[in-house]
Amino acid sequence: MKSAKKLIVSAAVTGSVHVPSMSEYLPITPQEIAKAAIAAVDAGAAIVHLHARRASDGRPAFEQEVFEEILPVIAAATDAVINVSTGGSTAMTVQERLAAATHFSPELASLNMGSMNFVFSGIADRITRWRFDWEKEYVLNSNSHPFHNTFEMIEHALLELGEKRGTRFEFECYDIGHLYSLAHFVDRGLVKPPFLVQGVFGILGGIGADHENLEHMVRIADKLFGNDYHFSAFAAGRKQMEFTTHSAWLGGHVRVGLEDNLYVSKGVKAKSTAQQVRKIVETLSDLGRDIATPDDARQMLHLKGLESTRIRPAALRI
């Protein structure tokens, strides 16, 4: 992997797996999501990884007008790199999942590198009172609905967002095979260095949150990509902080946020993603690592800059 003098902290503030019944602190409305992202940047995050939700009930949303209430607000208040998810949710079509990134042409977008079982139905075992009527069926359906990310879909995203719009990607790899899938697109010239590999651990259906797996993923990525890539990692759930620390120890970057883990320590719910950002920044600073600014991240990842996107800061909208 590329050796970076400064470490990039990404903040994933809401996601589409956790449902509102799991935590009163999970941002739901566009205003809450924007506020959470701004606070995370103030705490030290260089990149904000963004999903959207419907204000009325917290259901994952894809509509352009919902993102329009989020992205320009963040751009007006911070200089953060805005990363728009193309993962959406397993309940969305691929067109819905790509809609916001295609419209806003962000500097960075997430891209899942393979179809998989993405199971979070176990959430239902831990909730006795549901806030909204859609939640229980949504989480239970993950047991029978695979997460589709075919090569055709991946190529479409690389061409529409990458080739046509200059967006670069957070390549989300949930297993070792996803690295080889990414290598296929690199060999075809559809992915150009330097690129960001995001190792994802602890999802049922993907690679487990074992530290041996983290080191193995880095070894294979080094074998496939040499010095052409940056590595980042996170583990879903309780191993979030120890995995991010391990990633940094190996020379990689980190991602935290309520999308990935609702707690800040054992048995203590995080009140915000910013709280998790502050915790990992303090830990990494104690390890002697310098934290990257948004402009540092832009330089490392060769991003095109906010001015080349279709996100217009709220104060500058015409």
Image (cartoon, rainbow, N blue to C red):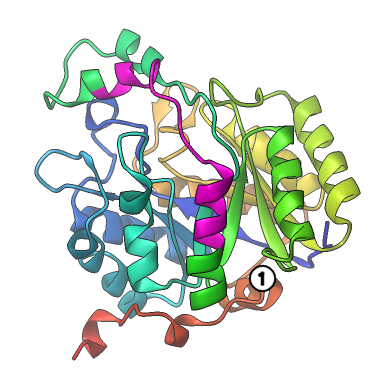
Q: Where is residue 16 in the image (x, y as percent from the top left)?
A: 34, 39
Start-end of magenta stretch: 138-158
Q: Where is residue 1 in the image (x, y as percent from the top left)?
A: 83, 56
| Residue under numbered circle 1 | 301
Residue 230 image offset from top left, x and y in percent: 74, 59
What's the residue at 16%, 15% (across, down)?
Answer: 129
**Which element is circle 1 on?**
helix
298 or 272, which is in the foreground? Answer: 298
Q: Where is residue 284 in the image (x, y as percent from the top left)?
A: 69, 51
Is residue 111 highlighted in magenta?
Answer: no
Taking the spot 72% from the left edge, 68% from the top edge, the residue there is 192
Q: Is residue 190 left or right of residue 134?
A: right
The reply, left or right, for residue 60 in relation to residue 240 is left
- Please identify the quarter of the rendering in which residue 58 is found: top left
- Residue 141 among magenta residues: yes
Report the label total.
Answer: 1
Q: In the image, is residue 251 above or below residue 245? A: below
Say few, some or many: other residues with alpha carbon within 10 Å of mark 1 (under 14 / 14 to 19 / 20 or more). Answer: many
Q: Does residue 17 lie above or below 195 as drawn?
A: above
Residue extending furthest front?
Answer: 152
In the picture, which quadrant includes the C terminus?
A: bottom left
Q: At x 29% / y 26%, what residue is drawn?
A: 22
Left or right: 118 in relation to 292: left
Residue 188 appears in view = yes
Residue 51 shows up from this direction: no
Quick one: 30 or 276, which is closer to the camera? Answer: 30
When asked about the image quadrant of residue 211, the answer is top right
Q: Which amino acid does label 1 sit on?
A: Leu
